[in-house]
Image (cartoon, helix red, strand yellow):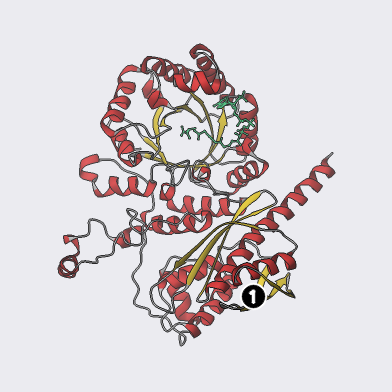
């Protein structure tokens, strides 16, 4: 293995899921983990197993089913957390227990209410305990960048003696700045005598917008594992954005002289999948994966790019899987062209998925002259990345206006049988949602509603993302249509399907628990 290698630790499913409002179910987490494995990250932090039965199940499922990357689970420095973590992780090809405790005085005094000696002892005990189950143990010194350096060096040295294979130094509150963080990593490398027996990792938050810059400064000073999340999602202002770090290392290879082992072609697709399932829309001007990242608006730039792309492009969009296709699809296109287009776009669909997607494509092509790649991607997300659907929109009729009470009549198929009802509301969307609640028997509380146009023009597909609370849990739903009321109802039904999926799974789990008693 080259000693220039940088290991990519993805925490989209753990810290990324700590983004306010994001809640992924087991199926969605598995789908993201499978895509992360295709992307080729070295480690997937699949969750925090003791946090909830759902998180435990997600880590266990990913550990058993996702091959390739190391699968890690986060645990506080306690036996209960580590027991739950190992129980979830033990089916993995390459499991890693990731245990942590804070080392800064501010966290010790106010949060943990323990002395430095007690925390040092607890850290060492946790690593030793984890080591009994798993040879690969990562230790994180939470709030490392605000910790006393002498004390931190002692903690790092002792946890390595206790068997930690990776030591992670997070900038938990995004307080560091690049030069300072680089010097901090250098000091650890110089002052901890056994540091070369472990891999040194960093985990930077983005409160000052410096998470990527700090991670790169750490690489220059000896860190060989970088933690972050796709699209930079995560607690508060988020984590270091992995795609930005990966592409900085690639584009400035002559400077960094470091290698990662990812499959660059999967970057864009991973970003879109994460955005779609979390409901966290990627800002258009986001580096690497934003809609405008490779768009040229100004005449002088366009002229330059037409003459020679490198005048204004430092990366090729194709490298990260942004495709440009010559196949123009419309209502006269057939299955062959459609399936060819999907292949070009990197989608691998089963026969049944292809049938569903093709049906929706034809419906759309009837309404829209040219169906763009963005439209197709939106349809695929709607049809194929949706979780199993017990409820399906069959038809929708609504009436509203300045002097009308908005009313909606909706037909929803439940396991193939169509039920219909009608109702009123504050607007047609609200009316339709009430009717869907009546038919499905679920009570959804709408927390957030977002509408985006997938493409430009009057016939653009509208994409609606909703966050809905059902039985105390939040679900993200997504729907697309050229009609925004229909897109809204599809999104709402998508969220209710996720709630229903959880309800059925929880019922199955509790009846099998009862059988086990
Ligand atoms: C920096 C990070 O991102 S760390 C990861 C943060 N992620 C999360 O917290 C999401 C998942 N968390 C949860 O579901 C819950 O917080 C749980 C299940 C872990 C714990 O829930 P609860 O038992 O109700 O405790 P609560 O969250 O209120 O408080 C945390 C407790 O853990 C203690 N604690 C915090 N970190 C650690 C640690 N690394 N090791 C040991 N104990 C810790 C706190 O001191 C507090 O203990 P106290 O109850 O004795 O005061
Ligand atoms: C637990 C650690 C890795 C963390 O998430 C942080 O410090 O931000």
Task: Label 1, secondary structure: give it.
Answer: loop
Horizontal side, residue 359 vs residue 300: left or right: right
- Residue 250 point in image, percent of width and height: 28, 48
Name the residue at 56% across, 25% down.
131
- Residue 274 point in image, percent of width and height: 48, 54
Quadrant for the C terminus in the image: top right
Residue 118, placed above or below residue 384 = above
- Specify the farthest residue to the top: 117
Horizontal side, residue 178 vs residue 429: left or right: left
The reply to whether residue 422 is visible in this rendering is: yes
Residue 432, placed above or below residue 476 = below
What is the count of numbered marks?
1
Residue 298, placed above or below residue 160 = below
Residue 371, placed above or below residue 65 = below
Name the residue at 34% across, 54% down.
286
Q: Which residue is mark 1?
A: 405
Q: Is mark 1 within 8 Å of ligand 1?
A: no
- Residue 256 point in image, percent of width and height: 24, 40
Q: Nearer the viewer, residue 466 or 414?
A: 466
Quadrant for the N terminus in the image: top left
Horizontal side, residue 257 vs residue 198: left or right: left
- Residue 205 point in image, percent of width and height: 40, 38
Horizontal side, residue 199 vs residue 317: left or right: right
- Specify the farthest residue to the bottom: 332
- Specify the farthest residue to the front: 403
The reply to whether residue 160 is visible in this rendering is: no
Q: Nearer the viewer, residue 423 or 275?
A: 423
Instruction: Mark 1: give few (<14), some (14-19) or many (20+) Cα within 10 Å.
Output: some
């Amino acid at each position: 293995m080259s000693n220039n290698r940088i290991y990519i630790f993805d925490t989209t499913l753990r810290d990324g899921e700590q983004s306010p409002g994001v809640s992924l179910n087991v199926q969605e987490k598995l789908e993201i983990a499978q895509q992360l494995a295709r992307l080729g990250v070295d480690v997937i932090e699949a969750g925090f197993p003791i946090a909830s039965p759902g998180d435990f199940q997600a880590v266990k499922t990913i550990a058993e089913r996702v091959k390739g990357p190391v699968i890690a689970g986060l645990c506080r420095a306690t036996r209960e957390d580590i027991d739950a973590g190992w129980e979830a992780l033990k089916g993995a090809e390459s499991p890693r227990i990731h245990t942590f405790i804070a080392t800064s005085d501010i966290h010790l005094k106010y949060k943990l209410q323990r002395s430095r000696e007690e925390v040092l002892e607890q850290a060492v005990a946790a690593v030793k305990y984890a080591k009994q189950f798993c040879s690969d143990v990562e230790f994180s010194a939470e709030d490392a960048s605000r910790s006393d350096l002498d004390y931190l060096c002692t903690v790092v040295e002792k946890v390595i003696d206790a068997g930690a294979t990776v030591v992670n130094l997070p900038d938990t509150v995004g307080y560091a700045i690049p030069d300072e963080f680089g010097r901090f990593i250098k000091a650890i490398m110089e002052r901890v005598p056994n540091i070369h027996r472990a891999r040194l990792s960093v985990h930077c938050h983005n409160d000052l917008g410096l998470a990527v810059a700090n991670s790169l400064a750490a690489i220059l000073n000896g860190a060989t594992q970088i933690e972050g999340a796709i699209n930079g999602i995560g607690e508060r202002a988020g984590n270091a954005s992995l795609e930005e770090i990966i592409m900085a290392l690639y584009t400035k290879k002559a400077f960094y002289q470091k290698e990662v082992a990812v499959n660059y072609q999967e970057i864009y697709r991973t970003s879109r999948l994460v955005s779609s399932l979390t409901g966290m829309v990627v800002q258009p001007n986001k580096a690497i994966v934003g809609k405008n990242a490779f768009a040229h608006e100004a005449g002088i730039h366009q002229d330059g790019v037409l003459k020679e792309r490198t005048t204004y492009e430092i990366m090729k969009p194709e490298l990260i899987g942004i495709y440009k296709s010559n196949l123009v699809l419309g209502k006269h296109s057939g299955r062959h062209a459609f399936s060819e287009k999907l292949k070009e776009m990197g989608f691998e669909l089963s026969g049944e998925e292809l049938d569903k997607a093709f049906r929706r494509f034809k419906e759309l092509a009837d309404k829209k002259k040219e169906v763009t790649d963005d439209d197709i991607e939106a349809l695929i997300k709607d049809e194929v990345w949706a979780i199993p659907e017990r409820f399906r929109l069959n038809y929708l009729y609504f009436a509203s206006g300045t002097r009308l009470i908005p009313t909606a009549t909706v037909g929803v198929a439940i396991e193939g049988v169509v039920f219909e009802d009608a109702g009123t509301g504050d607007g047609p969307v609200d009316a339709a949602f009430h009717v869907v609640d009546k038919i499905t028997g679920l009570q959804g509380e709408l927390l957030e509603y977002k509408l985006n146009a997938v493409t430009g023009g009057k016939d653009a597909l509208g994409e609606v993302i909703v966050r809905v609370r059902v039985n105390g849990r939040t679900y993200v739903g997504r729907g697309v249509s050229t009609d925004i009321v229909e897109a809204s109802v599809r999104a709402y039904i998508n969220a209710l399907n996720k709630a229903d999926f959880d309800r059925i799974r929880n019922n199955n789990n509790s009846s099998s628990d009862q059988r086990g008693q």
